[in-house]
Amino acid sequence: MQKKKAEMTMNKPIYHITPEKGWMNDPNGLVEYNGVYHVFYQADPEHLINENIGWGHKISSDLLHWEECQPALLPNQSYDRDGCFTGSAVIKDDKMYLLYTGHVNQESGYIETQNLAVSKDGIHFEKYDGNPVIKNPPADTTMRFRDPKIWEKNGNYYAVIGGETEDKCGKVVYYRSRDLQEYTYCGVFADSDGSIGNMWECPNFVQIGNTDVLIISPKGLEKENGFSASFESGYMTGKMNYEEGMFSHASYKKLDHGFDFYAPQVMECGDRKILFAWFAIPDSPGKEMEDGWRHLLTIPRELKVASDNSLLMTPIEELKKLRTKVLEKTVPGASWNCNIENQPLELLLTGRYEELCFEIADKNEPLLEFTLKKDNIVLKQKREDGWQIRTCSYYDDIMRKMQIYMDYSTIEVFINDGRYVFSSRIYPVGSLDFRINAAADNEDGSLEIYSLSL
Ligand code: FRU
């Protein structure tokens, strides 16, 4: 099914995690194990849609170069025969455990159970004989009951699982276990009145410094409630009281404001918390289908909590090692433009900008435009269905930094150290025209563009 390299119609991104062939969706089981970073992901190598989903697997020692391993989980048991869906990993007694959702289609609907697999070397996995370890959804939860994220705290293991109430409101429930095999239901972790979608997929719970964070991917969002697409990912910061079994949290905020970002998961590397997301939403086209693969993951981003309790997402420092050549180094002034061949690159703009318009055109056809004005940032982008916009409230007086990563068909924009982030797929056909218009001269400003290679 996969075309030979010479026949490829588009260049494949080089520093993002992509499938060798076929379909890719959510990152799964992100874990550091004996000094090696493991990224699993939802994979169907034989199809360009998610027909027969198992877990693909890649490993790295530097978060930049990824080596393909054999598939970790295949849908081959009575309890997961229609998909080994999303889940997570935890290390116990030097073994790696995966907790994942087994999906089984039925004449009416489906059954989703939670299952365990274990590995002594992080490469070969055996499914547990006693599966499923969580058989039924708790009361007031429909059959949509999936994507366990497990962590350890004070000798107990906790798992949050995404779900939907009978009234079609998104929620997250949680369980506790001492041994990873037997689970006690602890109750609702977080829920909603239905205004944030009907189902919360891929919950993640992570402690960053003193702040606890629940990340969710709501689906079934409605434009009338102010959402721009029916899928997005967001978070709530707060504090988990393990004695009282209570997660007190602030209100929901969106995590990434671009067109193609969903189902993020966090890898815990000591104090560093590194997020990868699916670089798509279920509606994203994925033009690379013509080349026998579809979708990819975002670059790894380090998560921090700002003083106002918002999450900041910045590209990991390691990415700087990819800088190979300076393509441009200038003071952009009030307006600047240049033409650069489409290639893996990083653009770094610093200074003090009250307002800014940043454009990319392809063969003189506008492709994408960022406008940063008082109160909001607007991303306007040419998509399959014409010009579309995404907006995000902007709380800063001055833009100090804009860092952009591009990898042939991707763009990830980080403004003011990851306070505002936009991730989108783009499909330029020619070289790229970059244009910047700042409202005033910026003598202190600097603009650097680097070509990147592995
Ligand atoms: C999110 C999701 C998960 C599910 C997986 C199936 O993209 O729908 O809820 O486990 O994808 O591939």
Image (tube, rainbow, N blue to C red):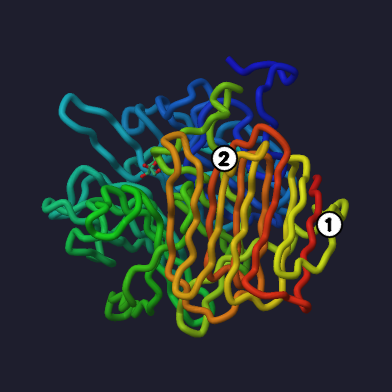
Residue at image coords 60%, 33%: 19
Which quadrant would residue 18 be assigned to in this image?
top right
> Which of the two discs, 2 and 1, sits closer to the camera?
1
Specify the quarter for ligand 1. Answer: top left
Q: Which of these two is toward me, 162 or 158? A: 162
Residue at image coords 58%, 55%: 31
Mark 1 surroundings: few (<14), some (14-19) or many (≥20) residues within 10 A = some
Question: What is the three-letter code of the residue carrying label 1?
Answer: Glu
Q: In the drawing, does residue 33 fall left or right of residue 126?
A: right
Q: Position of residue 323 (x, y in %)?
A: 82, 54
Note whether ligand 1 is within 8 Å of mark 1.
no
Identify the element where label 1 is drawn: strand
Q: Is residue 92 visible?
A: no
Which quadrant would residue 408 be assigned to in this image?
top right
Residue receiving disc 2: 296
Question: What is the three-letter code of the residue carrying label 2?
Answer: Leu
Q: In the drawing, does residue 74 fall left or right of residue 269?
A: left
Residue at the farthest bottom position = 307
Q: Which mark is residue 328?
A: 1
Q: Which mark is residue 233?
A: none
Q: Is residue 253 visible?
A: yes
Up the image or down, 42 lies above or below 97; here it is above
Up the image or down, 293 lies above or below 99; here it is above
Location of the C terminus by quadrant is top right
